[in-house]
Image: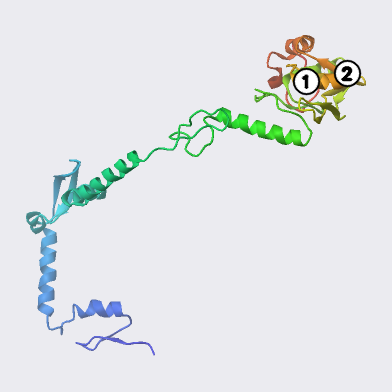
Amino acid sequence: MDKKHICRYCGKEFKTAAKLGGHVSKCKLHPKYEQIINKIVETRKKNIDVKVYVFNCEVCNAEYTLKLNKNQYNDKSYKRTCSRHCASVLTARNTNKSIKNQKISKKVKLNNDAKPKKIKYCKLCGNVIDTNIRKHSSFCSDKCSKEHRHIALSKNAKLRKFGGYVPNSIKKYKHGIYNGIHYDSSWELAYIIYNLEHNIPIKRCVQIRTYINEDNKICNYIPDFEVNNEIIEIKGYFSENAKLKAKYNPDIKLILSKDMKKYLDYTINKYGKKFWENINRGISPLPDKE
């Protein structure tokens, strides 16, 4: 059964409780009907006398405007700040909360200063790490982090008997595919361009060669190219590791930095100093330089 909403003074029925509540306060049979009407009239009179007043915020001294009647203005029952933020600052000033918070914060700072700070050292170079800048890092710089990662990868490669670690070998190099042949440096790209444009057959080497490293372990590696049934290895820096590879694989022809002059001069004269940028990867043949 739906509950009926009936006025207890006049007996009039309403569909909802909200409508009943609005009627009861203004019902003519209400015992305090005259008092209620007088209050409504007074409030309306007060609203008629409303004026706009300009005040200055007690916190930031900014100007703000309020619409007030005479009673509100005389009683000073209006807000004294221009915003909620200033109001919270004002209440904090007028209470002891701000003083208590200041005392607590001072105690916390003193306790933190009294605690000995933990000194962290870099895993690679052993230098002290600035914890304010690198709070959660185990390395003093990005360079040490990359170097440590490179060493770890090299160790895993040695365990798999593939490759070895070369100090200071972390650098940005050019790589891509030219005429279906993969290159890992600008030197390799220049060598490929020279051979193709002189009708010399060249392809990427797929043979796996072995050598014994400094730790007397057998390692595998793949040379760079096969040109006219000859295996070619391009080495800009002839390291100890490269010397061992050459020692155990004497049939492989090494092209060092002095030998690369011919190939680099040809490519630079035709395509410019930054020839790797002027050549679209994977697009061939390349346009001739005017």
The kind of residue tagged 2 is Pro
> Looking at the rendering, in which quadrant would you find the N terminus?
bottom left
Front residue of 203/267: it is: 203
| Label 1 crowd (10 A; few <14 / some 14-19 / many >=20) | some
Q: Position of residue 69 (x, y in %)?
A: 11, 57
Q: Position of residue 77 (x, y in %)?
A: 12, 56
Q: Residue at x 74, y 34 (%)?
A: 157
The residue tagged 1 is 242
The kind of residue tagged 1 is Ala
Q: Position of residue 195 (x, y in %)?
A: 85, 17
Q: Residue at x 44, y 38 (%)?
A: 118
Front residue of 39/196: it is: 196
Instruction: Say which element carries label 1.
Output: helix
| Label 2 crowd (10 A; few <14 / some 14-19 / many >=20) | few
Q: Compared to 287, does 97 lie above or below?
A: below
Q: Residue at x 76, y 22 (%)?
A: 241
Side of 69 where 134 appears, left or right: right
Q: Residue at x 10, y 63 (%)?
A: 45
Q: Can you tell which mark lies on residue 250?
A: 2
Q: Quadrant of residue 251?
A: top right
Front residue of 81/213: it is: 213
- Residue 215 visible in rendering: yes
Which numbered disc flags the more N-terminal residue, 2 or 1? Answer: 1
